[in-house]
Image (cartoon, rainbow, N blue to C red):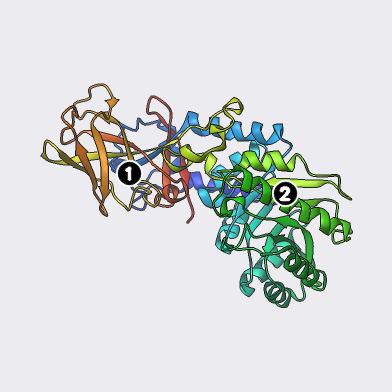
């Protein structure tokens, strides 16, 4: 039933009408449904799209989906990619079609989006203490026996609040104790002794069930391979100690989860060392940025740089803007800004120019992005830069999570510019 609901909800996205809400789309497409516009297979550059417009590469998106499916399978990992990256149910379903166990999320709103589109397995990488949200999750669990939900716990107080909110629930909520990545790191329980105290509190709460342990190695202070591997071994040892103590009695599987987008090779290494426990272990990887990858931060930190024999992710985003001012030989401005481009980790990267006169696309030689205003990109142009008012500038972006969130409907374009689909986001 939930799968049918998800399929129907996805179909309704295609029935949504194009209007002023969706920036960058052709003005003459107003009133068409998304499906009708996609069926026209317009060209991104000649089909009436307005700048700025963000596009995803159809080929690179599919490449990234396949690569991480293969990687997880090769290393014996279940995969729950973090959905907060895209908040795009169409991509959630493509990830699941490519072998994902489920979807990781961070806050209640995101879980509601996933459930509205039929996602049956959700890992919430956060402690959930909001009583209204907990009651909603409980109702979802009670109404759908196939729905699997797992959340972090990282304090006795949190366990107490969860238990109080869930009184009267039919099904207990599965939780995993979050081990902190170290002193001064983000969330999580700081010591193994405190982890045991939290686990004891879960055991005493009839509305909760201890399902495993988890954490996020990306928060290890001063992270390097040695420190990350050492922390992951602590996490594995915690699971083994809990199991030896009988804390997982009655489970069909023990959940062991870690993995952002910078150290999943270390997760694969250490999870391969997990000893035999009383029941099988679900080794759950949660990397999310891979789906679009990027031209900045994740290009620099991706584990595939360390293990090139395993493949390489490809940046799938490109932001197109138009030169609207060329006040001097050393300066130019385009019409994209902070409302359109991620800028929290790096500024955008000038990559290619498409001349306004229809000439061939060329590298953005001698062009550097130096700043962003709300609706302008500041460019420094060297002597070799060929750039005129009206030209389109294609820019790479850094940080997928703050790229997707600025666009409600994103064209998916093939290499020749043919737009074949539109991705709807829900932030």
Specify whether residue 87 is in view. no
The residue that appears at 45% across and 35% down in the rendered structure is 316
Q: Residue furthest top?
A: 360
Q: Which residue is mark 2?
A: 233
Q: Quadrant of residue 42?
A: top left
Camera-nearest residue between 119 and 284 = 284
Q: Crowding near pointer 1: few (<14 within 10 Å), some, many (20+)?
A: many
Picture coordinates of residue 299 (x, y %)? 47, 37
* Marks 2 and 1, how far apart at CA: 48 Å
Camera-nearest residue between 333 and 177 = 177
Q: Crowding near pointer 2: few (<14 within 10 Å), some, many (20+)?
A: some
Q: Where residue 24 is drawn, which disc sits there?
A: 1
Picture coordinates of residue 60 (x, y %)? 49, 31
Q: Is residue 16 left or right of residue 321?
A: right
Q: Residue furthest bottom?
A: 164
Counting every numbered tag in the picture gives 2
The residue that appears at 27% across and 30% down in the rendered structure is 364
């Amino acid at each position: 039933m939930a799968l049918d609901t998800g399929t129907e909800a996805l179909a309704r996205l295609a029935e949504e009408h194009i209007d002023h809400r969706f920036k960058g789309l052709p003005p003459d497409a107003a009133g068409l449904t998304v499906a009708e516009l996609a069926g026209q297979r317009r060209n991104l550059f000649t089909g009436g799209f307005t700048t700025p417009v963000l596009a995803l590469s159809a080929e690179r998106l599919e490449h990234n989906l396949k690569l991480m499916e293969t990687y997880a399978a090769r290393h014996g990992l279940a995969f729950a990619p973090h959905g907060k990256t895209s908040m795009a149910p169409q991509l959630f379903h493509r990830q699941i079609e490519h072998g994902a166990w489920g979807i990781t999320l961070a806050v209640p709103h995101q879980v509601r989006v996933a459930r509205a589109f039929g996602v049956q397995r959700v890992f919430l990488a956060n402690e959930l203490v909001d009583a209204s949200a907990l009651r909603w999750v409980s109702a979802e669990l009670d109404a759908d026996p196939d729905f699997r939900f797992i959340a972090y716990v990282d304090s006795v107080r949190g366990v107490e609040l969860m238990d109080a909110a869930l009184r009267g629930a039919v099904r207990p909520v599965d939780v995993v104790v979050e081990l902190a990545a170290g002193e001064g790191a983000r969330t999580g329980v700081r010591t193994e002794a405190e982890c045991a105290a939290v686990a004891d509190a879960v055991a005493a709460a009839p509305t909760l069930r201890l399902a495993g342990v988890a954490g996020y190695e990306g928060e290890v202070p001063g992270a390097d391979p040695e420190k990350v591997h050492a922390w992951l071994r602590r996490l594995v040892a915690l699971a083994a100690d809990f199991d030896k103590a009988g804390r997982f009695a009655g489970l069909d599987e023990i959940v062991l989860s870690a993995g952002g987008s910078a150290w999943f090779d270390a997760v694969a290494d250490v999870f391969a060392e997990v000893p035999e426990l009383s029941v099988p272990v679900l080794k759950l990887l949660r990397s999310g940025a891979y789906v679009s990858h990027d031209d900045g931060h994740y290009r620099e930190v991706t584990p595939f740089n360390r293990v090139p024999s395993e493949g390489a992710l490809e940046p799938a985003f490109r932001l197109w803007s138009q030169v609207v001012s060329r006040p001097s030989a050393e300066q130019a401005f385009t019409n994209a800004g902070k409302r359109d481009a991620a800028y929290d980790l790096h500024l955008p990267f000038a990559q290619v120019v498409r001349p306004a006169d229809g000439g061939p696309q060329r590298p953005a030689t001698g062009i550097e992005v130096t700043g962003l205003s709300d609706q302008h990109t500041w460019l420094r142009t060297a002597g070799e830069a060929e750039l005129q008012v009206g030209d389109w500038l294609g820019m790479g972006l850094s940080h997928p999570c703050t790229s997707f969130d600025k666009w409600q409907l994103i064209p998916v374009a093939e290499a020749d510019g043919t737009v074949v689909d539109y991705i709807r986001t829900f932030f």
